[in-house]
Image (cartoon, coloured by chain):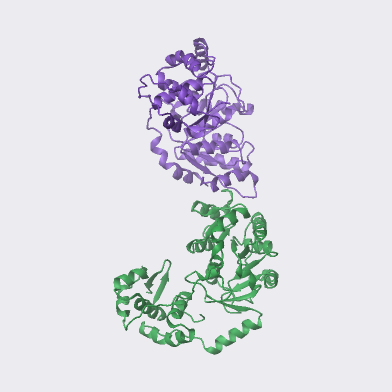
Chain colours: A green, B purple
Amino acid sequence: MRTPGIGPVTYRQLIARFGTSAAALAAVPDLARRGGGKAPPLRSRDDAEREIARVEKLGAKWLALGQGLYPRLLAELEDAPPLLIAKGDLNLLDRQSVAIVGARNASAAACRFARGLAHDLGQHDLIVISGLARGVDSAAHDGALGTGTIGVIAGGIDVFYPPENEERQTALYERGLVLAEMPPGTEPRARHFPYRNRIIAGMSSGTVVVEAAPRSGSLITARLAAEAGREVMAVPGSPLDPRAQGCNQLIRDGATLVQNAPDVVEAIRPFASQVRSPRAPFEPMLEQLNGHDALATVEELLGPSPVPVDEIIRLSGAPSGAVQLALLEIDLAGRLEHHAGGKVSLRE
Amino acid sequence: MRTPGIGPVTYRQLIARFGTSAAALAAVPDLARRGGGKAPPLRSRDDAEREIARVEKLGAKWLALGQGLYPRLLAELEDAPPLLIAKGDLNLLDRQSVAIVGARNASAAACRFARGLAHDLGQHDLIVISGLARGVDSAAHDGALGTGTIGVIAGGIDVFYPPENEERQTALYERGLVLAEMPPGTEPRARHFPYRNRIIAGMSSGTVVVEAAPRSGSLITARLAAEAGREVMAVPGSPLDPRAQGCNQLIRDGATLVQNAPDVVEAIRPFASQVRSPRAPFEPMLEQLNGHDALATVEELLGPSPVPVDEIIRLSGAPSGAVQLALLEIDLAGRLEHHAGGKVSLRE
């Protein structure tokens, strides 16, 4: 999972095919060569052991997809992180949760509202998840600190960002929980935040957007929640307030208007039973390939326009396992691009 | 229509059965006696002629249900007013319209919003209808005065209420239109306002609620619009603002969230073609009764709990025309109560 060019989807497919990471790692160079590219630069065993030791020294724990306390709802995402690093109270992972997200430069009123809502959701036994950012995120964590809150951060588990949140993040180590996908020491960069947002949306039964500008990160989180089939909720505001536009648009687009904790509790009730229902994270590819090689056929069917994998399987006439393997090879060669809705295209 | 105890529904049924008001008036005493009560106190021809002369002297006109410029959409209501008194520019009646309603004690921001929205809707060739009340109503009229606005008032056409709106109402006589259902000189009373609200909702393709407390008159107008099958729209506000609660609840209940004129235009587009499509206001009762008398049967089927008229017809086994006549008789005797959804019960 630390190999450049191997994302969570590819990781999942490799493990599904080869059973263990050792077998997958051994196979990668050959697969990539067959796919028409160079093997990605694999990390050494030493690298991995150094990171494991560092996490341990930081007092943090690993959560592995499909094992132990790894959040069940998050495991349902196709691109669920294979591993998470967690520091704090792991018991919080076993309870139903709601994300509260919103603008970093939110109004004082919105922050007060987010804090109150988080507090009230805590009284309903819900865990509040947010991103430890300025504004709405910070207010949500503060409101739920007494009842249970999880901060998902874009950088390493030991990196305070924004710096003024050091005290709040430390409070979450001690009385809540902090989760990170990136290795310790990682300074968060712009591209890390959408990854972080998918974890927030993916862990939660629903996402409440409190105040968000159009085209903001909070709306990305809302979209990811919708794509994961979770409840999207938004707090309305006056059309005269530009900071309310994102939320009002979400409601026009079908999000549930929420004004208080009971509204949220009612909206996410259908998800209550799913929090603890386990699901096999790696579905083994049962189909036998019988030596079938679909690589040439699949390469021919791929182009610069995204095509659903299902359609490639149908058009190829090959067993789906053989098509999946061919796609994996092209992927590891750095030539495949993944798109929303299970579509793929050839990288230009 | 000025007879106490004869509401618009009964009026419509009488005209449908007897063809003209003269024939209906002649029949009323007998019908009421058969229904088991006293005849309602009928007004004299002199009374009617005095009112007609007074309306003329005020420079106002009569609009009769189903005739001339009587608003087509309003005519679709089961309880459409048989007559309206109009003062101002009657041309405004022939165009698509939207109601803007809201709190009398609305915030300055809400009034500013209502004025701007009304102005922008005028730019989209829409007539703005409201109730000439304080607050949102007044702001809506002001915003649309240059493009076309209709004020529906609860009292007589010549009565200024609230008094400080005299100048505004006079401006509507001259540059807009004022409509009244009650006779000239009527001071508006609490019971008149729901009647006024049904006209506002009934004339309009949709109703926009700008700021409304829970259980306010504006929400009644919204409910009447929904019952008439029109678009219900609401302007959201922060949950921290108690004045936004009515609108936010409307949106939760299914009203369309609107933030600006294009949102409204989009929502009411399906009604554009209906403004001018005529509809027979008095559907004649074609069925012959053949001397069938259903009065005793219908009386037996009625009780203190509201029952749909359709069900009474079915249970009676009598022709529906005979049941309708029996209900009319009981109604004119003052013993029938009308409920929403075409239900009736016996008055205790």
Q: Residue furthest top?
A: B46
In the rendered image of this protein, does residue A272 appear above or below residue B142?
A: below
Residue in view at x 64 percent, y 75 percent: A87
Q: Position of residue B30 (x, y in %)?
A: 47, 14
In the rendered image of this protein, does residue B241 appear above or below residue A285?
A: above
Which is nearer the eye, B22 or B154? B22
Which is nearer the eye, A136 or A275? A275
Residue A211 vs residue A5: left or right?
A: right
In the rendered image of this protein, does residue A255 appear above or below residue A323?
A: above
Name the image quarter holding residue A179: bottom right
Which is nearer the eye, B94 or B323? B323
| Quadrant showing the C terminus of chain B | top right
In the rendered image of this protein, does residue B258 appear above or below residue B182?
A: below
Residue in view at x 41 percent, y 18 percent: B18
Query: Is residue B11 visible to the viewer in this orientation of the structure?
Result: no
Q: Position of residue A151 (x, y in %)?
A: 62, 69
Residue B102 vs residue A306: left or right?
A: right
Number of numbered discs? 0
Q: Position of residue A116 (x, y in %)?
A: 67, 57
Query: Is residue A43 visible to the viewer in this orientation of the structure?
Result: yes
Name the image quarter holding residue A106: bottom right
Residue in view at x 61 percent, y 33 percent: B134
Q: Position of residue B79 (x, y in %)?
A: 48, 28
